[in-house]
Structure formats: structure tokens, C-alpha cells
């Protein structure tokens, strides 16, 4: 169960799920050409430490194709990277009982249609109280 829609505004939502609590934090976000990931979960291997670049991905980005990040800066629990832009914004996070997702343009993994809610009262896509929120992408759910 993905939890209950707490608040939402167009392209993003926040849900609360008291039955499925993630110990600490896991997130992935993209905004234009910037990406960032964070994972502070017990038992997780982490991202390592260092700077990585990919000339293959750089050449693909120059040609207008995306094959992954051009470069990444990693510090164990976080990583930031640059890539060829595919979306304006996209991401999801799971921290304790709070779950968040955003997507523009809309997609099936994050937010697939306009949403609107305030204090557990959902107006879009359908009206109701304590409505179930969409499922988070597997990258932050597991």
C-alpha cells in the first residue's frame, strides 16, 4: 500500500504511510541536466567516494542522445551528476513515513496526471478523503 495522499499541487505530491516506514532516507531527483541521489539506509553499500566521468556518455550527449550520466561526484551516501536533459523535473523520495514524487512532463513511474490535495482531502484526479497515493518508483521504494 503506497500510503495516503497528504498534499499535492499539479506535478508533485506528498503522501504519508504509517504502515510502511523506511528507516532514514532514499531519493533520486533530476532537474534538467542535474541529477542527485541520496541513500542513508542501514545495510546499504553506498555510492563510494570519488569523481567519475564518461567520455562515451559525453559524446552521446553532444549528439543529442542520453545514455547515462556524463560525470558523477560521489560521497558515500550522496551522488550528484550531469547528464543530457530528458525531463524538466522528475524524482521521488522516501523518508520515514513520508513519500514524495514529482514529474514534469507526466510519466507512468512518478506522477501520471495532475494531482491536487490538501490535508488528506484530494480534489484531483478524483475527489475523496484519505485517498490512496500513487506507488513510488522502485528506485526509492525498496
Image (cartoon, helix red, strand yellow):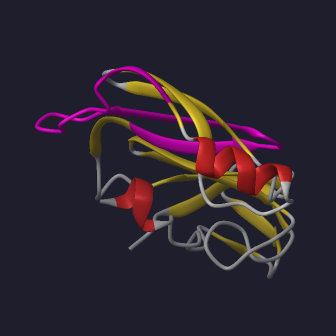
Q: Is residue 11 left or right of residue 95?
A: right
Image quadrant holding the N terminus, namely: bottom left
The rendered magenta stretch, by its main secondary structure, is classed as strand
Residue shown at 82% from the left, 79% from the top: 125
Q: Quadrant of residue 74?
A: top left
The total number of labels drawn is: 0
Near-viewer residue (45 or 13): 45
Q: Is residue 47 left or right of residue 83?
A: left
Residue shown at 51% from the left, 71% from the top: 135
Image quadrant holding the C terminus, namely: bottom left
Q: Is residue 13 above or below residue 65?
A: above
Q: Quadrant of residue 69?
A: top right
Residue shown at 42% from the left, 58% from the top: 139
**Horizontal and vertical percent for residue 18?**
35, 52
Q: Is residue 91 above or below residue 35?
A: below
Q: Is residue 30 in the magenta section?
A: yes
Q: Is residue 45 above or below residue 7?
A: above
**Horizontal and vertical percent for residue 100?**
59, 49
Q: Is residue 97 left or right of residue 133?
A: left
**Horizontal and vertical percent for residue 101?**
64, 54
Q: Is residue 84 in the magenta section?
A: no
Residue 50 is at least partly visible in this image: yes
Residue shown at 42% from the left, 54% from the top: 140
Q: Is residue 137 left or right of residue 58?
A: left
**Horizontal and vertical percent for residue 77?**
34, 25
Q: Quadrant of residue 29?
A: top right
| Residues drawn in magenta | 26-52
Residue 118 is at least partly visible in this image: no
Q: Is residue 91 above or below residue 111?
A: above
Amino acid at each position: 500500500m503506497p500510503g495516503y495522499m497528504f498534499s499535492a499541487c499539479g506535478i508533485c505530491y506528498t503522501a504519508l504511510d504509517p504502515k510502511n516506514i523506511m528507516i532514514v532516507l532514499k531519493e533520486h531527483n533530476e532537474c534538467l541536466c542535474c541529477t542527485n541521489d541520496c541513500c542513508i539506509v542501514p545495510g546499504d553499500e553506498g555510492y563510494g567516494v570519488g569523481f567519475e566521468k564518461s567520455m562515451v556518455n559525453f559524446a552521446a550527449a553532444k549528439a543529442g542522445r542520453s545514455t547515462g550520466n556524463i560525470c558523477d561526484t560521489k560521497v558515500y551516501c550522496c551522488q550528484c551528476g550531469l547528464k543530457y536533459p530528458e525531463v524538466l523535473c522528475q524524482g521521488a523520495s522516501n523518508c520515514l513515513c513520508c513519500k514524495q514524487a514529482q514529474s514534469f512532463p507526466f510519466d507512468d513511474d512518478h506522477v501520471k496526471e495532475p494531482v491536487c490535495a490538501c490535508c488528506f482531502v484530494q480534489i484531483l484526479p478524483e475527489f475523496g478523503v484519505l485517498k490512496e497515493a500513487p506507488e513510488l518508483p522502485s528506485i526509492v521504494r525498496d
